[in-house]
Amino acid sequence: LGENITVPVSEDSQWRGWGAQFSPDGQWLSFVVPLLQEVQAYNFESGENIVIPSRTGEPPFWGADGSFYFTDVQLRGESFAVHVYRADLETSESFDISGEDAVVNDGGVVWSPTDDLVAFNRKPSRTPSGKQLWLMNSDGANQESLTQEPDLHHGPPSWSADSSQLAYQVYNLTELNADPQIR
C-alpha cells in the first residue's frame, strides 16, 4: 500500500463532514457538512474546494463518468420538495434532474456500475406513503417507477456489480413493529 497522507480540506477545524467519497478518477473527495448545510468537493491536485448549498444532509455522490450529484430542498410556498441535481464542478452550475416542476422527495441515489442509469427513492411531497424505487438516465430523462407499494417504504438501493439487480430494504408502514426485509 502507499504512503498514508493526511490533508486538511478546511482551515476551520470546528465543522464536521461525513459521507466522504472519492471521484472515480481519485482526484476529488466529496462530503456533506450538515452544520453548514452544504456539500463540498475537494480537488487533491489543485487544492480547490467547491462548496454547494444543500439542506438535506445527504452525502453527494459521483457518477461512473465523474459527474457530481447532490440533493437539495426546494421551497414551494408552504411545502417543500427534495430534488436531485447534477453539478458541473468547473462552472459551479447545477442542473435539476428530478424535474423542476416535480413536487417529490428524491434521495438515496446510486449510479449503475455498467450503465448510464441511476436508481433512487421517491415519494410525493406531503404524503404519508413510503418511498418507492425509481430508475432514470443520469441526465434525468426516462424516469420510471420500479415499485408501486405505497404502504411499503423502500430503502436506498444498491446495484449488483453487473447492474442486473438492485437490493434494498423494505419496511411495512402499516404494521406496528414490522421487521424490515431485504429484497
Image (tube, grey):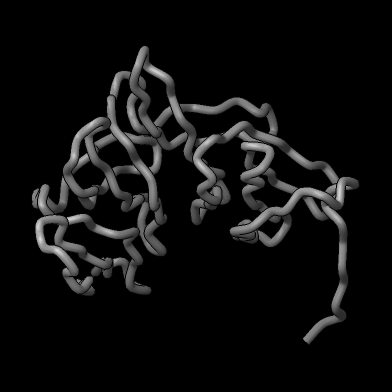
**Residue 59 location (% of width, % of height):** 55, 51
- Please report the residue visible at 55 percent of the width from the left and 28 percent of the height from the top: 94
- Please report the residue visible at 43 percent of the width from the left and 28 percent of the height from the top: 96
Quarter-of-image position of residue 2: bottom right
Q: Nearer the viewer, residue 76 or 21?
A: 76
* Outermost residue toward the top in this view: 77
Q: Indicate left or right for 109 with 89 as reference.
A: left
| Above or below: residue 113 compared with residue 13 | below
Q: Indicate left or right for 11 with 170 as reference.
A: right
| Above or below: residue 90 compared with residue 149 | above
- Please report the residue visible at 62 percent of the width from the left and 37 percent of the height from the top: 37
* Outermost residue toward the front in this view: 176
Quarter of the rendering occupied by the C terminus: bottom left
- Please report the residue visible at 18 percent of the width from the left and 40 percent of the height from the top: 128
Q: Indicate left or right for 72 with 97 as reference.
A: right
Quarter-of-image position of residue 84: top left
**Residue 120 location (% of width, % of height):** 32, 50
| Above or below: residue 169 compared with residue 122 | below
**Residue 156 location (% of width, % of height):** 34, 59
Q: Nearer the viewer, residue 89 or 39?
A: 39
Q: Indicate left or right for 144 with 22 as reference.
A: left
* Outermost residue toward the bottom in this view: 1
Q: Nearer the viewer, residue 71 or 172?
A: 172
**Residue 53 location (% of width, % of height):** 62, 31
